[in-house]
Image (cartoon, helix red, strand yellow):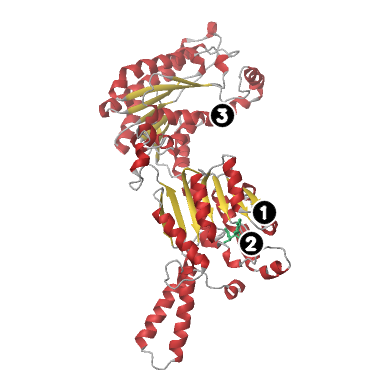
Amino acid sequence: IFYVILKVPDTPVAILVDILTKAKEIAAASGNVPEELRSHLQKAMDIASGLDDYLEKMTTQESEPLAELYTKTISHDWDQVHKEGKTMFRLPKECITGHIEGQTLKMLTHMSQAKRVLEIGMFTGYGALSVAEGLPEDGCVIACELEPYLKDFAKPIFDKSPHGKKITVKIGSAMETLKELAAAGEQFDMVFIDADKKNYINYYNFILDNNLLQMRGVICVDNTLFKAKVYLEDTVDSNGLAVREFNQFVSDDPRVEQVIIPVRDGITVIRRVFVDSERFSVTILSKITDDKVFRGVKGCPILDRMRLDGRVAYVTGAGQGIGRAFAHALGEAGAKVAVVDLDQDKAEVVAKELFLKGINSIAIRADISKPEDVQMMVDKIVSKWRTIHIACNNAGINMNSASEDTSLEEWDQTFSVNLRGTFMCCQAAGRVMLNQGYGKIINTASMASLIVPHPQKQLSYNTSKAGVVKLTQTLGTEWIDRGVQVNCISPGIVDTPLIHSENLRPLVQRWLSDIPAGRLAQVTDLQAAVVFLACDASDYMTGHNLVIEGGQSLW
Ligand SMILES: C[S@@+](CC[C@H](N)C(=O)[O-])C[C@H]1O[C@@H](n2cnc3c(N)ncnc32)[C@H](O)[C@@H]1O
């Protein structure tokens, strides 16, 4: 309530409400205003005055630190602070971005998958903290601010928030900070310009001219409606005129594409459009080699070419460990994933994990050593999603015994899953893929296909995995001219809960001394490889054994 009383109209809508309130008062005082006009005035008032409240209510509530920052900011006596000489300028509390704009910034941060954000004009840090909340754990915000007082003002609240540590405040003229950042070769995924309006064009040009914005970054600019003064003809306010000039400049700039979102006092969102812009001058384009390297294959930059949107994948042995990590990785890259495991419950749990993240998934129980199960798996996927693009044949078993004691049962069982099972999966999925002229098969082999891991004795495992590599090479060369690539991944020793058992501890010590990386593999170390082999960027690779073992096979 305190805030409402103190609030001055500072957005187009708030000004509209203010004017309508005055018009209503005049109408009320005048005896001869037609009822219809009064009713229109009331309706216009209801529409305009209800908007901000409704936005507040329907937008995700702000976090406690943000709420505290807001209250602390609007209840602070900024005039007094200025009189005491603690700030250079008299800072109007209304310049805080606040709940709706903060949530908008957080959402934009999230949507643009930004990791590094630059804010020009931090004030008390509401925008900076909102952005920080939308960043991943290793994200960072560099917030430029002229007034040293504001850094100390914001600090206690930044310290209270788990996201505050992502924010670095740079005190001084923002232009000087920009120059330092450019000299250090820094780049940002998102830049939020919200400082002195007369410098907007300078900040904007400096950012673009010095590549402070990374290739796919966005610039957000605050107050670009500037209380409607940017389009009202009688504007004389110098800030209003400066923002108007800025908007016109951006609108005429062929390097970018932009939109003004009428949130609060207007936020312009700007992105670079280097090659796909029809507005880009022909003379500039004639000097560059305009090919797939420049534009990207099918117009996609390399990371986009690694996406798997719309693809259908399955992963066997996906109920845990490497298979589970593969299923998550393929799903995160955009594929629908069938989670296949011998254990139905485990498959269902992983499928649920994927679903929770927004990845379409199904769980399938299958014993890949049985031909009928393998065919059932393929049929189920095809009947559900019409096809299979990515077959990740990962299920395998490992039994240890000295070679002189290895039983035929152990040998047969190992081969029946690791080699025969993998072959059956390749064949069943391969038939679907050959038929459609497209497919990616990724088998899980092992570093044991290259070296003989020791001191444990695992003859049947080692030989079966060597077989998986030869299977991969043979199929990879036989099928590539029909659009199907077959590759395999050979992990080194992977850190699993099993490995931490008391009796395996001495063995782990031994292995560690054999690994140049000085650590075991985490399942997450293998995720990029499966996405790479599953995507179009690896189309020219086939029959390859991608070894990921921290250098162990080289020692
Ligand atoms: C509109 S407020 C920023 C609001 C803030 N982004 C938020 O989320 O609440 C503008 C801020 O820019 C700062 N500022 C103005 N001119 C500046 C300059 N040349 N360099 C750095 N900061 C400046 C002001 O001190 C003020 O704190």
Mark 1, mark 3: which one is toward the viewer? Answer: 1
Q: Position of residue 89 (x, y in %)?
A: 65, 64
Mark nearer the N terminus (3 vs 2): 2
Extreme residue toward the top, this view: 404
Q: CA distance from mark 1 to mark 3?
A: 33 Å
Labelled pair 1, 2 in contact (Cβ < 8 Å): yes
Q: Position of residue 82 (x, y in %)?
A: 69, 67
Q: Is residue 356 visible?
A: yes
Badge 1 marks a residue whose secondary structure is: helix
Extreme residue toward the bottom, this view: 31
Label number found at residue 522:
3
* Label 3 environment density (alpha carbons within 10 Å; few <14, some 14–19, many ≥20): some
Label number found at residue 271:
none
Mark 3, mark 2: which one is toward the viewer? Answer: 2
Q: Quadrant of the N terminus?
A: bottom right
Rendered view: 422 above or below 331: above
Rendered view: 510 above or below 97: above
Count of numbered tags = 3
Label number found at residue 68:
2
Q: Residue at x 51, y 9 (%)?
A: 406
Report the residue marked by disc 1: 160
